[in-house]
Image: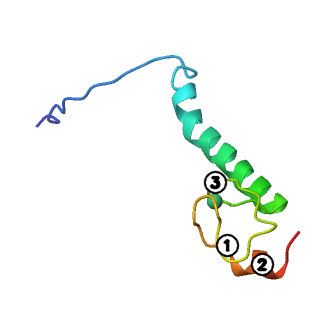
């Protein structure tokens, strides 16, 4: 009794060929996180980046609501 043959395919390439494809999503994530933290730190709208220091309840530029913590603890 012999083992049944199972068809398979393989692909071989240098390890660094798929590297750019695997770095796209982490890079986009880091860029977006940096932008979000910067806007939060400077008191800007998290959606459009408009300066919210003189605004009370929503962004005059895009209409996004301002988080209550930003209104109570302005930076
Ligand atoms: Zn906005």
Depth check: 69 or 49 in front? Answer: 49
* Residue identifier under label 1: 66
Q: Is mark 2 within 8 Å of ligand 1?
A: no
* Quadrant where the N terminus is found in the figure: top left
At horizontal 57% and vertical 66% (from top left) the residue drawn is 63
Q: Is mark 1 within 8 Å of ligand 1?
A: no
Q: Secondary structure at mark 3?
A: loop
Query: Crowding near pointer 2: few (<14 within 10 Å), some, many (20+)?
Result: some
Depth check: 36 or 47 in front? Answer: 47
* Residue identifier under label 2: 71
Determine the residue located farthest toward the right in the rendered image: 75
Q: Position of residue 72 (x, y in %)?
A: 81, 82
At horizontal 57% and vertical 26% (from top left) the residue drawn is 20
Query: Crowding near pointer 3: few (<14 within 10 Å), some, many (20+)?
Result: few
Depth check: 14 or 31 in front? Answer: 31
Q: Secondary structure at mark 1?
A: loop
Distance (Cα) linking label 2 and label 3: 17 Å
Distance (Cα) linking label 3 and label 1: 12 Å
Q: Is mark 3 within 8 Å of ligand 1?
A: yes
Distance (Cα) linking label 2 and label 1: 7 Å
Query: Crowding near pointer 1: few (<14 within 10 Å), some, many (20+)?
Result: some
């Amino acid at each position: 009794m012999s083992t049944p043959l199972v068809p398979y395919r393989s692909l071989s390439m240098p390890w660094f060929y798929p590297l750019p494809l695997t770095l796209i999503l982490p890079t986009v994530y880091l860029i977006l996180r940096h932008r979000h933290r910067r806007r939060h730190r400077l008191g800007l709208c998290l959606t459009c980046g408009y300066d919210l220091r003189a605004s009370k309840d929503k962004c005059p530029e895009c209409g996004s609501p301002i988080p209550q913590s930003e209104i109570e603890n302005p930076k």
